[in-house]
Amino acid sequence: MPHACHPACSAGPARQAPLSGRARAILPLAARCVWAVGLVTALASGAWAQSVALQGMLGSRALLMIDGGAPRSVAVGETVQGVRVVSTSSDAAVVEVGGKRLTLRLGESPASLGERGQASSGRISLPADGGGHFMGSGSINGRPVQFMVDTGASTVAMGVSDAERIGLAYRDGQPVRVGTANGLAQGWRVKLASVRIGDVEVYDVDAVVTPQGMPFVLLGNSYLNRFQMRRDNDQMVLERRY
């Protein structure tokens, strides 16, 4: 399955972003369903917080309930009781506790941050579909997406529709030229705050947004290089590098 990787894209409209032949082949397909992922658990250092939950949004401010106390309105960049708000969207907030990031969504149970929190296994198993492609559900910046492994893409890649659905400010990214089924087109190079599959979350991942629709978010090498990969029958197993 693995094949040669494309070089990483550079700034400027004349350069081509790294989408593989497989990516160009699936661009015109209709989008498929996505599945939500479970709530992240994390371990805080220093003072131990018991729980944190997102109670609501006040514009761009997150209304957080920490340790069962009264809801607190916290702006992006502010820290309350050791919990820092990294980013917000209409129904979610990414927070950081003790150097660990987790995503809170409206309506979910409080995330446990105490000693009983479950640590990440560092291992991901992705099953093959009928066509031999390795698939998996997960999230980007706390929003659910459907992934497909593409070892020929230098970065994670997604269509504009997925980027807009997850609230990604892709137009603020670096303009690049991307290869599509219809030739070169305008795209954007961005940095993803977090990419999560199962209980494994990776931060600051390079990605490219292409203007044409894509049925999946492609897991390229900006993500895959963080792992050791092996095939186990009809499973792709990723073991986190530390």
Image: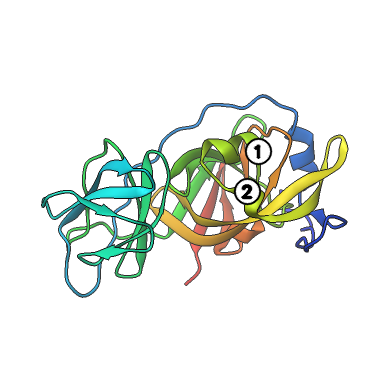
Q: Label 1 amino acid?
A: Val
Find disc 1 in the rendering and name its residue: 160
Residue at image x 67%, y 32%? Answer: 131
Q: Classify 10 Å Cα crowding around label 2: few (below 14), some (14-19), many (20 and above).
A: many
Residue at image x 38%, y 58%? Answer: 76
Residue at image x 77%, y 58%? Answer: 5
Mark 2 residue element: helix
* Horizontal arrangement in the rendering, residue 87 relative to residue 155 (left or right): left
Q: Mark 2 and mark 1 in contact (Cβ < 8 Å)?
A: yes
Find disc 2 in the rendering and name its residue: 170
* For residue 220, above or below residue 25: below
Q: Classify 10 Å Cα crowding around label 1: few (below 14), some (14-19), many (20 and above).
A: many
- Residue 7 x, y percent position in the rendering: 79, 62
Q: Residue furthest left?
A: 69
Residue 59 or residue 52, whichever sits in front:
59
Earlier along the polypeptide chain: callout 1 or callout 2?
1
- Residue 40 x, y percent position in the rendering: 33, 51
- Residue 161 x, y percent position in the rendering: 62, 34
Q: Residue furthest top?
A: 30
Res 42 → quadrant: bottom left
Q: Label 2 amino acid?
A: Tyr
Q: CA distance from mark 1 to mark 2?
A: 8 Å
Residue 110 or residue 138, whichever sits in front:
110
- Residue 68 x, y percent position in the rendering: 11, 50
Image label count: 2
Q: Is residue 128 visible?
A: no
* For residue 38, above or below residue 46: above
Mark drawn on residue 102: none
Mark 1 residue element: helix
Residue at image x 48%, y 59%? Answer: 202
